[in-house]
Image (tube, coloured by chain):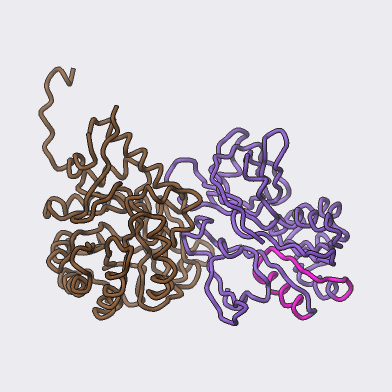
Amino acid sequence: MTTADLTTRLGRLELTSPVLVASGCGGSGRELQPYADLAALGAFTTASITLEPRRGRRAPRVAETPAGLLGSLGLPGPGVDVFLARELPWLAEHCGRVIVSIAGGSLPEYAELARRIGTAEGVAAVEVNLSSPDGWDRADAAARDGYSAQRVLAAVRQEVPRPRPVLAKISADVGNVTEVAAAAARGGADGVTLVNALPGMAMDPVTLRPALGGVTGALSGPAVHPVAVHAVYQVHAGLPDLPIVGTGGVRTGWDALELVLAGASAVGVGSALLRDPAATDRITSELTALLAEHALPSLAAAVGLGHRTRPAITESETA
Amino acid sequence: MSTAVPGRIRGEVLSVRRTGAYHHLTLRTPGIAANTRPGHFVALAVGGDEPVRLGRRAFWVYAADPGGLYGGSTEVVVAVRGAGTAWLTGLSTGDPVDMLGPLGKPFALPREPVGCLLVGGGYGAAPLLGLARRLVDRGCKVHMLLGAATEDGLLSPLEARRAATSVALATIDGSVGTAGPVSTLLPDAFGTLDVEVAYACGPHSLLRAVSEAATARGAYSQCAVELPTSCGTGLCLSCVLEVTGDDGRTRTVRSCVEGPVFAGDAVRWGRL
């Protein structure tokens, strides 16, 4: 049996594999290196880079929930200067393609980040974090509506040289995810990443108070996977030409294929890496096997397949 | 001290043994044990392949045997605190366990044969027994202080007596040794023993007490800091603490990557 062709496209960006590291769960890349083949990744998406260094929220920062993890990190990171000097060159050398996620607290901050990151060598694409429930201490900084999304994307697009794609990462925690995706595209996004972690909370059974130091957190893991499949399905139905990176609770090759069938051209692996730092290798081989099992010649043949009417089943097939 | 390159293996349960308040879980871990030093930890996945409990559980290595019948084994001490640890202690011989290790930076050993004080609280004594043996092999005098809430929480006091030059015990309820937290033994130990390096593992309050007592006596301290993690590899960013570097600047670092063993005087204990 021939192996299915895994190459895929996000607009102008061609990737040798649809399996990506999602933003926020791959560390600086170095942490994964002992376990995973980084060069085989479609791309590595960085944690959201901020203009200034951020220490992040106080402990406890992670709580385990049924089939999920609640994170309350507060976007810790070295800031854009240190990222460009120390982290990006290493990632570009070892990971093939690097998608840099950016998070600003205001339109000028997004524009400044876009200018610094968008023109840096080794950046394959810029992902605009519009909606991290874990990000800012003020919830109103997140662009959850179409109007804000379009304004942020326009500010970013203006600063990123044209051939370099810009993706908008959108939460499912918005009124109408297709509307927000369409607005981001009007603002200049070449594609969307669906979905960001969902807002969540847990109480501590001993203290009877919020389990996370930051009180509220961001839910990821298998618990959010069906939400991601739904969001990808909706957006692909409404905007069939808009490239989608599906992400949310991907743990197995089948989870990845579900997002592809719903309309994703690439799939981000996030919290699964915390348990299995070699998850991207395993998911890639499982996905390859599933494509072969279903006689799909390429990943491209599976993108959005879940939307298409099934061919009529003949009597001989049902017998 | 250099960091060993960690590996990921499908370990196999050799035994689960209940001792006092803890369970000793011994896994067949070919290739891992040879690189393991006292202060290293391992991270175990719990719940098999079911995606219900996602986080790994981190454990100090109690013993690592690179040879033997099984081609290398690793023994950890498990205190049951929830469903994940209960799952681990319910395993049977032959069951598979997904393990990452050895992780982190282990205890640094003195070059000269100096006097060492090893202080362990509860299951935090786990990495200290192997450390005591290594220090004795180097000609060091090794004094151990072990403490717990009750007698059954004292980890391996008999093995400690065999390994160390001297051992003193403390329990909060006074069932064995001095009544009170193990830190009550510190003034006497630092006052009467020749201590150049203090090693500690246990609750943060104990680590702080050891660090401050050592600094006051002009001794070095090495503290193994346990913080909640869900990966053990540095990805989840949850096991952070503040340390002050040689340059005088305070940074937020991940215990699992830059530690878990830190110089006691570098840690900002008040911020933990």
Q: Nearer the viewer, residue A176 or A29?
A: A29
Q: Which residues are magenta?
A: B191-216
List x then y, in percent, for residue A116: 30, 74
Q: How many marks?
A: 0
Q: Nearer the viewer, residue A13 or A150?
A: A13
Q: Quadrant of residue A170?
A: bottom left
Residue A95 visible in rendering: yes
- The quarter of the picture where the C terminus of chain A appears is top left
Image side of residue B241 versus residue B179, left or right: left
Chain in brown in the render: A
List x then y, in percent, for residue A164: 22, 63
Residue B52 visible in rendering: no
List x then y, in percent, for residue A180: 17, 64
List x then y, in percent, for residue B169: 82, 62
Image side of residue B185 versus residue A250, left or right: right
At x 13%, y 50%, the residue is A237
Q: Is residue B265 above or below residue A317?
A: below
Q: Is residue B52 above or below residue A179?
A: above
Q: Quadrant of residue A199?
A: bottom left
At x 73%, y 36%, the residue is B68
- Does the magenta-highlighted stretch encompass residue A310? no
At x 72%, y 77%, the residue is B212
Q: Nearer the viewer, residue A99 or B98?
A: A99
Chain B's colour is purple
Q: Quadrant of residue B136?
A: bottom right
- The quarter of the picture where the N terminus of chain A appears is top left
- Does the magenta-highlighted stretch encompass residue B213? yes
